[in-house]
Amino acid sequence: MHCAYRGVLCLATVLRGVRNAGMDIWPPCPAPFNLARHVLEASAARLPDKSALQILKPTGAERWSYARLEAAVRGCGAGLLALGLEPGDRVLMRLGNGVAFPVLFLGAIAAGLVPVPTNAALTVAEIGRMAAVVGPKLIVADAGVALPDPLPCPVVMADQVAKWEALPPCDWAMGDPERLAYAVFTSGTSGRAMAVGHAHRAIWARGMMHQGWEGLGESDRLLHAGAMNWTYTLGTGLMDPWTLGATALVPAAGVAVEAMPLLLKRFDATIFAAAPGVVRQMLRAPLPPLPKLRHALVAGEAMPVALAREWREKTGTGVYEALGMSECSTFISASPLRPAPEGAAYAQEGRRVTVLDAVEGEGVLAIHRSDPGLMLGYLGDDAATAARYRGEWFVTGDLVRRAEDGAITYLGRADEMMNAGGYRVSPLEVEAAFAGLAEVAVTEVEVKAGVRVIGGFYVGDASEANLQARAEDRLARWKQPRFWLRLDALPRNANNKLNRRALAVLYAERGKP
């Protein structure tokens, strides 16, 4: 790793000292600090002509060097300040998968402003609710993207971001690493989207992921299949490669999942990152040889063991899963340096995690409040922030099982666990029983007043008789779905995560066939 600040020891040197002292901690973030400077300055100085970003289409790519990317980011910061914005002001981002997205995100942070990325597919009503929480002083938008109504502030169109590239660079806004740098919205699967505020130090914490999960180095070309507004893409797909001097590969807006194998091969990707749902779609068709690919990374939802095996068989490469959340990004993971048992992962070196209320190793995963990657809090909701803590521990809401060697197996969200005959049942355990037969999702639904059962929802040509026979063969009676409903596709949110709440709604609307 490299050092981004004059007069500060390189991170690798600091780590050697910390580990030699026998302490399992991550070194403190340098101060003063700026997230955008940490991401770009050192790589742009060392590798000005190297390709930092390529936005991919089947017909070619838009390429940006490190020197040009840094100039565009700092020019953007200057342009934003010229509009009269002041440090701490919030900028609502309504952009798709184009270069304007990372330039605006890092440009705002470089200038001391607070960008808030959002999914370009949100409706007027949805983005209106989010804007009310954020209180933006400026909106930057692509043409045709839904905006709040009424508008709470001025709007600048995305083509203006390109024009700012020619401006003299803004100074890096240095300051306390604990101050607010950016905010992202949770997926809303818990009922409502929450605005998660992150400090500048969040990028420093990502250093634990570079080898603790990603196996990422300067020579890598990392292709991420997600939308840029997703924190998984922002971190793993863009900022981590740039921090290390690697090349980030991102599909252009509108590129279909079916095109990913061709893009991996054509653009010599060495690492592929995606949600498990994307991997599943890719594997439905034969894959071309991928001689440059070293391994894949998955996050966003649990990856079925059978799907991981299929990836390894068809590509000849490893796949490493991580568990994280908007409030702390990924902190539990397998990696090339530390492969984990099937379906499990380890806490990254430097993390302090525990399992609360554990019974025979099963309980709720929690991370210590000292973790530098942990959020500052939910914007405008101190009560919701406080409710996530139990003493010194941030309670994730994820149910896990921890083995004696520290391997952690994800069992599902606490609010998604099902109760069947008085037994707690993990939906992931039930769904895994149908691997290779059909794509199945289960949830608990109310079939009549006061009566709740496990319902099965599936995609594919399997018959209900075959599904029930598989359930009887592999699941105890209380874990078996009591009915089956065939769907054209399982409901997923904008980041391709399974939406179990929507399954219950579908049942209420359609009922048992």
Image (spheres, rainbow, N blue to C red):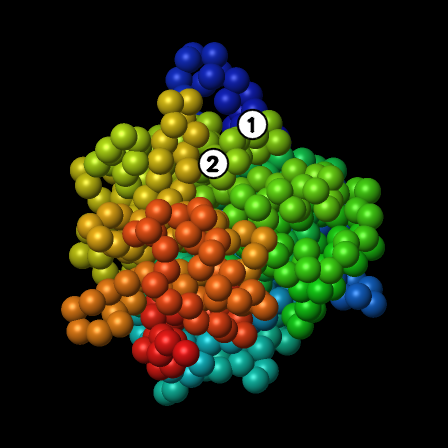
In the rendered image of this protein, does residue 229 appear above or below residue 391? below
Q: Taking the image as drawn, is residue 117 in sight?
A: no
Disc 2 or disc 1, which is closer to the eye? 2
In the rendered image of this protein, does residue 419 appear above or below residue 5? below
Residue placed at 40% from the left, 42% from the top? 410
What residue is disc 2 on? 344
Q: Amino acid at mark 1?
A: Arg
Q: Amino acid at mark 2?
A: Ala
Identify which residue, 317 or 383, lies in the foreground: 317
| Kind of element beneath mark 1 | loop
Please indicate whether residue 111 sits to the left or right of residue 281 in the image: left
Asked which quadrant contains residue 10, the reply is top right
Give x and y (percent) for residue 281.
Answer: 64, 61
What crowding class fits label 2: few (fewer than 14 Cα within 10 Å), some (14-19), or many (20 or more)? many
Q: Taking the image as drawn, is residue 316 in sight?
A: yes
In the rendered image of this protein, does residue 334 appear above or below residue 123? above
| Kind of element beneath mark 2 | strand
Residue placed at 58% from the left, 40% from the top? 320
Identify which residue, 191 or 115, lies in the foreground: 191
Give x and y (percent) for residue 171.
Answer: 54, 52
What residue is disc 1 on? 338
Give x and y (percent) for residue 232.
Answer: 52, 53
In which quadrant will I find the N terminus? Answer: top right
Residue placed at 57% from the left, 33% from the top? 335
Asked which quadrant contains residue 280, the reply is bottom right
